[in-house]
Image: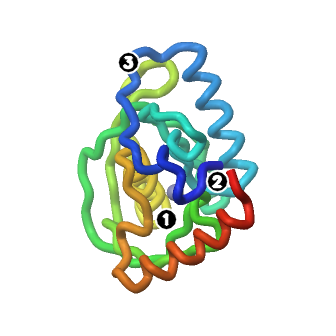
Amino acid sequence: MRIYGDQVLRQVAREVKEINGELAKLAESMLQTMKHNQAVGLAANQVGELNRIFALDASLQSPKFEPFVLINPEIVEVSGVQVGEEGCLSFPGIFEKIERPQRVTVKGLNLEGEEFQFEGEGVVARAVLHELDHLNGKLIIDHVGSIRKQLISARMRKISNRNPP
Ligand SMILES: [Zn+2]
């Protein structure tokens, strides 16, 4: 897992031009990493890959949810407002209150290259928008005020000093 301070988290992921075996392998490993960490979402940047793809799994929130990956995701529509705690596997132990739209409609491609649209609200909408941020090099620390920002940076420096790359 790439942790805050790693440059790849600040880079903009590239559009996927071809859905091939390599991408399918990446998607599979992202789904497993997400499940293993009980995360709701994971973006390619977080595993060191700069492809526009993210994985989503809200099955802990709603048991019928089928985990999926979305390739070249684009926002169709957002509405409403919610404020809630948000965490990130790239910021272990950090949870911040962040304002996001309450609902989101996003579209993209599945691993078969077919276009599909997904609508989510609440925690799921939050996760979709969080993962889209990752693909654009944006992180939770960019959503907080300057004092929180300093506190988070200080905590993250401690963590990375303990676990040098
Ligand atoms: Zn994250």
Q: Residue at x 24, y 51 (%)?
A: 77
Residue matched to label 2: 59
Looking at the rendered structure, the secondary structure element under dot 2 is: loop
Residue 161 locus on image (x, y percent): 68, 66
Callout 2 amino acid: Ser
| Mark 2 or 3, closer to the camera | 3
Residue 57 locus on image (x, y percent): 59, 49
Looking at the rendered structure, the secondary structure element under dot 1 is: helix
| Mark 1 or 3, closer to the camera | 3
Residue 79 picture quarter = bottom left
* 147 or 78, nearer to the observer: 147
Q: Is residue 107 left or right of residue 87?
A: left
Distance from disc 2 to disc 3, alpha carbons, whole Å, reads: 30 Å
Residue matched to label 3: 17
Looking at the rendered structure, the secondary structure element under dot 3 is: loop
Residue matched to label 1: 123
Q: Residue at x 33, y 55 (%)?
A: 104
Question: In the figure, 59 relative to 100: above or below?
Answer: above
Residue 117 visible in the picture: no
Callout 1 amino acid: Val
Q: Is residue 143 left or right of residue 70?
A: left
Which mark sits nearer the N-terminus, 1 or 3?
Answer: 3
Is disc 3 surrounded by few (<14), some (14 to 19) or many (20+) residues within 10 Å? Answer: few
Callout 3 amino acid: Lys
